Image (tube, grey):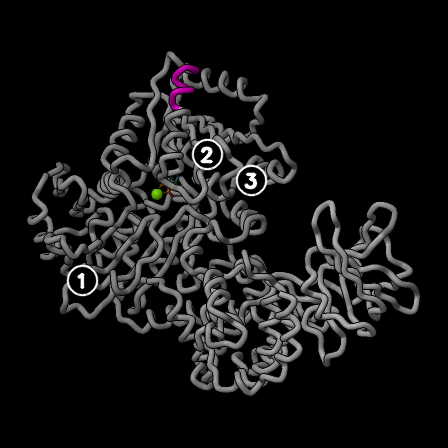
């Protein structure tokens, strides 16, 4: 490694040999990268010259203060600058170590610098040479010596390693930060003047950003900590800008498509509202209005309703569906699971039957197809017949699972097609693109249906502006009246018994209980998880001999899971032990307790989702968060659950504490740590979004920005 360092000084003269290279040059064609190193670099995803140039430091070390040898303190990091006045080599007999000793002197004093087992370094040093060296003063036997970490000779124009601010790159086995620094120094020097600016001039000016050239140099080899920070900011801003451009572009493209313009049928909507057994909340009314306004435009809507579990999203969907039907179009509602599809089928049918609406249900797994007719009765018909009715426009609302669109190559089943599909509603299923929507329409239909997505997962504002930036948002921020807040408390191991007693009392009252097993990282439906559930199940069986217990886990078939949920709802058993696979959205009105084991392993948003399984009636419900980690950080985080009942609030806290990695849809973008971090900074996100809005209409004027956007689009595979 140190021989490599020595080459570094020669490396500066090789500028010309990089001149012909472009970013896609394979890493093995770069000087000083042999086959072995290439392999290691590839392991950390550095495959090309471009990857290497943009492999940014993980952090920096500040060596700007040089310590006089006389002022050295024991065991404190220090940087020395001095002349080598003696070089000695010896061997320790006891441990069979080689010992290389340099006597280093500055104008204050001298100190012995000792390298153990690195005798090969001897040839690197010469008496009288000046070096800079970092390390610590240590105590050995009866004397002190300086134990070095990095050193560098000062006889060059610019230092690579012991600069005042030293970049530290993430290391991996056999690949040191030092080596990466050594590779990068000449490359950065050579490329910094050849790379074009990628941000429009006005964006740089208005946001007070560093130029590309400067930032590129300063991020690798900064002059000061501040300039390193500014350089980082520039690149982060650029990424946020690109993400915003990407989602805005998608949004504008969608607005260019044609869709059915729907009149707002006030009278029928009023009749529907007054037929409901409850009053709509102001939030529900506002959201319905926002949607109707979108539908009134001849371009496809792409709107997401966010509302906590139980905030009443279904009735909003039902209302706008009726409006679509009165505009002579059909509606499809897609749910993530069989059981939810059935629940929606019943709800929507009950809601719309007075309006003489035909509702159909199509689920793939069971191969059973129903269609409700006008007279309140359920008629079972074949899939063939149902599809025919759909195609002929006789079915107004078709409700189903993914089976509605998933088109398998082998699957010989005919596709679901509509005569005039006007609105697609997707419950708890995020990405659904124009292509998929078009798949549902007859071929001669040049219109795209409007899209309404619904989710109970709150999306923090910074994510809503960036990765979900192609969607318009409607937020249901009020719960229906009379809902009781779920009482939440953290349970430490010593309080366990008390908690079980409490649960027992609830069960005796005739209520039910969920127990959620801890998450096992990276291993959603694993055997380990299965074991976990089984162990918990056995334990609870012993603990509650008078009650019936069932379990639910990822290895079960959908049909089995559905069966269990149905039986739980019918109160055939009292405790359900489950992994985190537990279904979203199913109402178990008598479930009043949820006990979440290993609560510290879940994000707050997910805990909040679990908590939403209870408190779905007027009964007081309870959520217990069990953790063995009695440390301040964990407890503080979990305390947020005790304090806040709003999913939005919790999601913002989650974002700050854990970063955006846990949020739906974030992982598939494959962001770097830099960007993950940047997504926490709402101010910068807002600025980048504003800049993107301004530039997108004129992006052709900026060819290198355009190019970056194109390559960004190639990398992100999001429908
Ligand atoms: P989610 O938003 O989780 O999908 P649902 O649409 O399933 O919520 O509604 C949850 C429950 O709240 C349902 O039983 C529904 O009938 C009821 N509900 C919806 N809106 C209101 C309201 N404004 N007042 C009272 N109850 C309501
Ligand atoms: Mg729902």
Residue 339 place in picture, x, y as percent: 26, 38
- Decide if residue 417 is on the left or right side of residue 203: left
Circle 1 SS class: loop
Q: Which mark is residue 644?
A: 3
Q: Earlier in the sequence, mark 3 or mark 1?
A: 1
Q: Is mark 1 within 8 Å of ligand 2?
A: no
Identify which residue is drawn at 84% across, 66% down.
Answer: 86
Q: Eyeballing the image, is 624 above or below 458?
A: above
Q: Earlier in the sequence, mark 3 or mark 2?
A: 2
- Decide if residue 636 is on the left or right side of residue 309: right
Identify which residue is drawn at 47% across, 78% down.
Answer: 23
Residue 562 place in picture, x, y as percent: 26, 34
Q: Is 298 in the magenta? A: no
C-alpha span from label 2 to label 1: 43 Å
The image quadrant of residue 522 is top left
In magenta, the rendered stretch is 537-543
Residue picked out by circle 1: 441
Regarding residue 196, the answer to whether it shows in the image is no
Residue picked out by circle 2: 518
Identify which residue is drawn at 46% across, 20% down.
Answer: 503
Circle 2 SS class: loop
Regarding residue 49, the answer to whether it shows in the image is yes
Q: Quadrant of the N terminus?
A: bottom right
């Amino acid at each position: 490694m140190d021989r490599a360092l020595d080459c570094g000084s020669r490396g500066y003269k090789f500028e010309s040999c990089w001149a012909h290279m472009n970013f896609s040059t394979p890493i093995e064609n770069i000087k000083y990268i042999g086959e072995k190193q290439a392999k290691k670099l590839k392991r950390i995803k550095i495959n090309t010259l471009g990857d290497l140039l943009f492999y940014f430091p993980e952090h920096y070390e500040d060596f700007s203060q040089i310590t006089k040898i006389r002022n050295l303190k024991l065991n404190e990091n220090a940087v020395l600058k001095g002349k080598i006045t003696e070089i000695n080599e010896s061997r320790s007999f006891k441990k069979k170590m080689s010992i290389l000793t340099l006597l280093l002197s500055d104008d204050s004093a001298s100190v012995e610098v000792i390298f153990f087992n690195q005798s090969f370094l001897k040839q690197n040093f010469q008496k009288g040479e000046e070096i800079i060296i970092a390390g610590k003063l240590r105590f050995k036997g009866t004397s002190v010596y300086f134990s070095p970490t990095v050193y560098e000779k000062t006889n060059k124009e610019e230092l690579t390693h012991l600069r005042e601010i030293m970049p530290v790159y993430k290391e991996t086995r056999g690949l040191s930060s030092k080596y990466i620094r050594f590779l990068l120094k000449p490359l950065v020097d050579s490329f910094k003047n050849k790379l074009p600016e990628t941000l429009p001039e006005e964006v740089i000016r208005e946001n007070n950003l560093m130029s590309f050239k400067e930032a590129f140099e300063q991020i690798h080899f900064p002059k000061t900590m501040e300039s390193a920070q500014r350089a980082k900011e520039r690149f982060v801003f650029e990424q946020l800008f690109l993400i915003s451009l990407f989602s805005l572009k998608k949004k504008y493209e969608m607005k260019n498509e044609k869709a059915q313009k729907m009149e707002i049928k006030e009278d029928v909507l009023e009749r529907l509202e007054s037929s409901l057994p409850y009053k709509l909340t102001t939030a529900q009314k506002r959201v319905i209005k926002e949607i109707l306004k979108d539908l009134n435009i001849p371009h496809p809507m792409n709107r997401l309703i966010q509302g906590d579990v139980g905030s009443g999203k279904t009735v909003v969907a039902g209302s706008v569906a009726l409006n679509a039907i009165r505009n002579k179009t059909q509606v499809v509602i897609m749910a993530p699971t069989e059981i939810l599809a059935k629940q929606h089928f019943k709800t929507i049918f009950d809601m719309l039957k007075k309006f003489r609406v035909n509702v159909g249900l199509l689920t793939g797994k069971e191969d059973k197809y129903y269609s409700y007719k006008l007279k309140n009765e359920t008629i079972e018909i074949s899939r063939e017949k149902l599809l025919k009715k759909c195609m002929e426009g006789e079915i107004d609302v078709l409700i189903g699972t993914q089976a509605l669109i998933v088109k398998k190559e082998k699957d010989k089943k005919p596709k679901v097609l509509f005569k005039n599909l006007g609105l697609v509603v997707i419950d708890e299923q995020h990405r659904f693109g124009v292509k998929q929507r078009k798949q549902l329409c007859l071929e001669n239909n040049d219109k795209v249906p409007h899209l309404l997505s619904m989710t109970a997962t709150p999306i923090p504002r910074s994510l809503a502006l960036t990765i979900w930036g192609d969607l318009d948002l409607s937020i249901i921020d009020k719960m229906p009246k009379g809902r009781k807040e779920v009482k939440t408390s953290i349970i430490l191991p010593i309080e366990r018994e008390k908690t079980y007693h409490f649960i027992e009392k609830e069960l005796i009252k005739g209520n039910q209980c969920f127990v959620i097993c801890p998450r096992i990282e990276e291993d959603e439906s694993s055997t380990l998880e299965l074991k976990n559930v089984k162990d918990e199940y056995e334990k609870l069986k012993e603990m509650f001999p008078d009650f019936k217990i069932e379990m639910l886990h990822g290895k079960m078939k959908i049909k089995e899971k559905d069966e269990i949920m149905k039986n739980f709802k019918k109160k055939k058993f009292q405790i359900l032990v489950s992994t985190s696979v537990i279904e979203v959205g199913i109402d178990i009105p008598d479930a009043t307790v949820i006990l979440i084991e290993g609560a510290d392993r879940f994000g707050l948003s997910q805990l909040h989702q679990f908590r939403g399984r209870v408190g779905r009636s007027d009964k007081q419900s309870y959520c217990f968060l069990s953790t063995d980690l009695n440390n301040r950080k964990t407890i503080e985080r979990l305390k947020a659950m005790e304090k806040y009942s709003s999913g939005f609030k919790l999601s913002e806290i989650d974002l700050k504490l854990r970063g955006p990695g846990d949020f739906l849809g974030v992982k598939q973008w494959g962001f770097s740590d830099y960007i993950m971090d940047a997504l926490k900074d709402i101010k910068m996100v807002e600025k980048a979004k504003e800049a993107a809005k301004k530039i997108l209409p004129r992006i052709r004027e900026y060819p290198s920005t355009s190019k970056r956007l194109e390559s960004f689009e190639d990398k992100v595979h999001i429908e």
